[in-house]
Amino acid sequence: MPLSAAHVATSRPERYAKQLISHMGHKADAEHTGVGSGTITFRSGTCSLLSAQGELVLIAAAADLDSLTGVQDVITRHLLRFATQEEIRVDWCEADSGDAIQIVPPAVEDYLRAHCTPADDLLTELAETTREATGRAAGMQVSAAEGALLEMLVRLSGARRAIEVGVFTGYSALCIARALPSDGYLLACDVSSEWTAIARPYWRRAGVDDRIDLRIGPALDTLRALPETPDFDFAFVDADKAGYPAYYEEIVPRLVPGGLLVLDNVFLGGRVLDPAFQGDDHRAMRRVNDALAHDERLDVVMLPVRDGVTLARKR
Ligand SMILES: C[S@@+](CC[C@H](N)C(=O)[O-])C[C@H]1O[C@@H](n2cnc3c(N)ncnc32)[C@H](O)[C@@H]1O
């Protein structure tokens, strides 16, 4: 599906987004997904709108190039009409196929992997064991570079108490736990006893077993059972994507000021950018990405690491 984006420099991104969504709502399906963001679905294609500091980001998608041009034209015409108070330019970038957005080109991925401290023997063995034991599901494991990033973030932040939502075979939990101090605590949530059983011997061998409190059950229940007090310094979310908005809402009040929330897979293979994808996961991830960007409790940075990693620091 062809995709194209335009970054429109303006001092009024939210106002234009609101005007476009309200106006187009008379002729097409248009919905607000957050402050200054939303989706307009025409018969010929869709356009997502996102407001950022000093710019309105438009992402158009359609089944073919002609339809894409139609979507671009109608959005551009209306936007120029609404902009009576300032001169704006709407320059659409060249259409992308939209099938698989390559966030980091493979050559760059190889190069950066070769220039990070490599995973040690224990992590490498855990990755191999996971591949042998779980087959295709092993693709869910964080990459070595992401594991190293988590470990560095925990060390840099000086975190003592952490939460993980989505343990699988324990690779990211191991990275987080070993970066905590010896009296540190990691509350690790997962629904699978089978997958997390693979983790235990590795945590033991790393000497961090006693720091990890593994809770088997829906993570939302585990989080909701915690006192609603700011008691955690770090949280990593990497579980069912439809659950992300609820995890985020439960975790933020439980973070101390300065605490860090890290979300994995925030691009969903690039599909968050393509409004043609309207599954529960896609909608939930868009909702959480939009909400985080406008959350006044947080400072947020989205990184193009693997499938997208968001860092949100509580103010
Ligand atoms: C992407 S994997 C996590 C990968 C892990 N972070 C790692 O580094 O290997 C997602 C995990 O979320 C778990 N999960 C899915 N739905 C869940 C839920 N509602 N509550 C808790 N865990 C869940 C799955 O069992 C799976 O182990």
Image: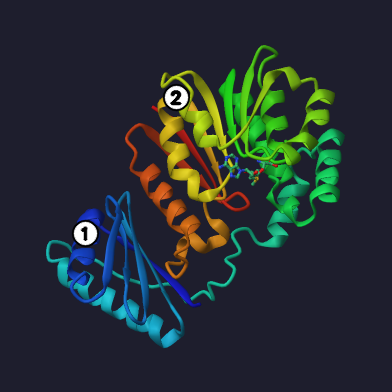
Q: Residue at x 56, y 24 (%)?
A: 157
Q: Is mark 2 within 8 Å of ligand 1?
A: no
Q: Which residue lies furthest to the left in this view?
A: 84
**Residue 171, image x, y percentages:** 73, 37
Of labels 2 and 1, earlier in sequence is 1
Amino acid type at mark 1: Lys
Looking at the rendered image, the quarter that the C terminus falls into is top left
For residue 199, what is the image quadrant?
top right
Numbered tag placed on residue 18 in the rendering: 1
Q: Residue at x 43, y 57 (%)?
A: 283
Q: In which quadrant of this rendering is ligand 1 seen?
A: top right
For residue 116, what is the image quadrant?
top right
Alpha-carbon neighbours of circle 1 within 10 Å: few (<14), some, or many (≥20)?
some
Q: In this view, does 45 lie to the left or right of 312?
A: left
Q: Residue furthest bottom?
A: 66
**Mark 2 — residue?**
254
* 268 lies above or below 118: below
Q: Is mark 1 on a helix, strand or loop?
A: helix
* 27 lies above or below 307: below
Alpha-carbon neighbours of circle 2 within 10 Å: few (<14), some, or many (≥20)?
many
Amino acid type at mark 2: Arg
Separation of disc 2 and disc 1 at Cα?
33 Å
Numbered tag placed on residue 161 in the rendering: none
**Residue 60, image x, y percentages:** 39, 72
Q: How is the image coloured?
A: rainbow
Q: Which residue lies furthest to the top in this view?
A: 183
Instruction: Give the foreground label among 2 and 1.
Output: 2
Q: Residue at x 47, y 42 (%)?
A: 301
**Residue 117, image x, y percentages:** 77, 37
* 247 lies above or below 57: above
Tag 2 and tag 1, C-beta contact below 8 Å: no
